[in-house]
Amino acid sequence: MQKIERDVVIVGAGPAGLTAALELKKAGKSVAILEARDRVGGRTWTDQIGGATIEIGGQWISPDQTGLYSLINELEIETYPRYKEGASVFIDHDGKRTVYTGEDFPVGEATVGEINKLIALMDQLAAEVNPDTPWTHPDAKELDTISFHHWLESKTTDAVAVECVGLFIAGGMLTKPAKTFSALQALLMAASAGSFSNLVDEDFILDRRISTTMQGVSLAVAERVGTENIYLENPMLRLEWSKDGVVAHGKDVSVSAKRVILAIPPNLYSRPTFEPPLPRWQQITHQHQSMGLVIKVHAVYATPFWREKGLSGTGFSPSSLVQEVYDNTFLNDPRGTLVGFISDEKADQMWALGEDERKAAILESMAGFLGEETLSPEVFYLSDFGAEEWTRGAYATSYDLGGLHRFGPTQNDAVGPIYFASSDLAGEGYQHVDGAVRMGRRTAARIVAEFEGTEYDASFDGAESAFGALAR
Ligand code: FDA
């Protein structure tokens, strides 16, 4: 067992942990990162599959994500736009397929009116919610103890409008059924992206991609942190802690440090042994944050055949197995790639099938949007984060009904030398890489202020580095 000493030990080399390490290094502090996997990037992960570049995890960046933008600017990494030209496809409850343009789903005038009414209401409430402290909203308890589905039903009698608006947050973001999380949790999701309108506009929220892939951002940060400071295949199994510091025990390295940052998803906080155990409140709080489940489908074709038909590749259907489809062709790739999403209970059903049956069902559903050419991809791959021991779901964690206002206020409290940093605990950028970057920067700034005996500015939002760029 190797024994080393650092100012701060960081657990998890995802975007939050790596950004924290980079910031601490800029502030002149020594760091080591323990990472369970044999790679950095966490829920951002790129692989070559059948000769195609596949972004298995996070990939899109939107204009409001200024924390991530400032990091990639610092790293001199470019972005490129998602292909958006052409018409979209909508499949309704009866299986009727409509090709349409414009922002409104082709669901009938009255339903469009109800959908827009609900979106306006969500925008109004989201503007009242501070994403860092949603529990301070005057109606927080009321909004947190009704499911998003039932809250929508209390605002309209139009079932199709409820289903369509529910999809944006349930299937589209939290990847849990809309009956299992609260209206307040939905409002946090909306407020974290600036507004509900931003969230429902795929041209905004899925605006651009990273030219080196999203995992490439983590790889570039890792290089600046120094790969010699990152201990791969070293899950933290045990943490000894006291007011004076910690010893973090990995598989084959132990790090003594003054502080530790747990930059792992909250659903995994119970995995290492804490000596002594965490206080009552932290042991309980984080049990109420659980992972959603979504299958990200990748299908690569000889050409982007849908473009020749005047289609953008975008498709929506609240009732289909695959509820969203987009053109996901990688930068300068002459082939065409589609990405599709299968969420929550539909994902459960798919994992219950055999491989061939699952593939056939998924491609059949995607062909409903873009035609029978969809049935024969050259490469077919399913992202399966539910089976990943060091994530256990996708995209991220959210509270169960009533948990956000009850446990949220203490979710970011440090316990002695132990700090928590995860995009799942972020306000702005919640559940996104942007939130991970912000949390990394904020946590590093808190620790540096403590080391230096200065006042930490709690309004610091992590949109920019607190320490400038690293001298190289
Ligand atoms: P993250 O989970 O990324 O990293 C945590 C790290 O901790 C991992 O490397 C893990 O191995 C490690 N770890 C866990 N336990 C450990 C232990 N005991 N010891 C040591 N290491 C341990 N976001 C976005 O902005 N745009 C997008 O398009 C998408 N799309 C998307 C698709 C899919 C399929 C997924 C799964 C996720 C996304 N996301 C996304 C979300 C985004 O990927 C996510 O918000 C960030 O990766 C979270 O970064 P963190 O560093 O907080 O955690």
Image (spheres, rainbow, N blue to C red):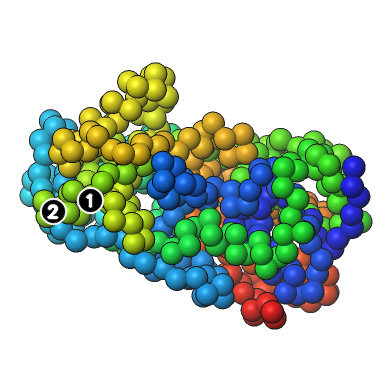
Up the image or down, 307 lies above or below 152; here it is: below
Residue 162 horizontal/vertical position (percent): 25, 41
Amino acid beneath label 1: Pro
Residue 257 horizontal/vertical position (percent): 86, 57
Mark 1 is surrounded, within 10 Å at the Cα level, by few (under 14), some (14 to 19) or many (20 or more) other residues, namely many
Amino acid beneath label 2: Glu
Q: Nearer the viewer, residue 297 or 404?
A: 297
Element marked by disc 2: helix
Left or right of residue 54, residue 113 in this image: left
Up the image or down, 355 lies above or below 34; here it is: above
Q: Residue 158 carries which label?
A: none
Q: Quadrant of the N terminus?
A: top right
- Contact? badges 1 and 2 (CB < 8 Å): yes
Mark 2 is surrounded, within 10 Å at the Cα level, by few (under 14), some (14 to 19) or many (20 or more) other residues, namely few
Q: Can residue 242 be seen in this view?
A: no
The residue drawn where x is 27% and y is 60% is 83
User: Is ligand 1 within 8 Å of the beta carbon of the residue shown at mark 1?
Assistant: no
Q: Which residue is the site of mark 1?
A: 304
Up the image or down, 76 lies above or below 226; here it is: below
Q: How far apart are marks 1 and 2 (CA)?
A: 8 Å
Left or right of residue 58, residue 8 in this image: right
Q: Quadrant of the C terminus?
A: bottom right
Residue 34 horizontal/vertical position (percent): 75, 49
Element marked by disc 1: loop
Q: Is residue 364 visible?
A: yes
The residue drawn where x is 49% and y is 47% is 47
Q: How many marks?
A: 2
User: Is ligand 1 within 8 Å of the beta carbon of the residue shown at mark 2?
Assistant: no
The residue drawn where x is 51% and y is 37% is 385
Q: Which residue is the site of mark 2?
A: 308
The residue drawn where x is 62% and y is 39% is 390
Residue 65 horizontal/vertical position (percent): 46, 66
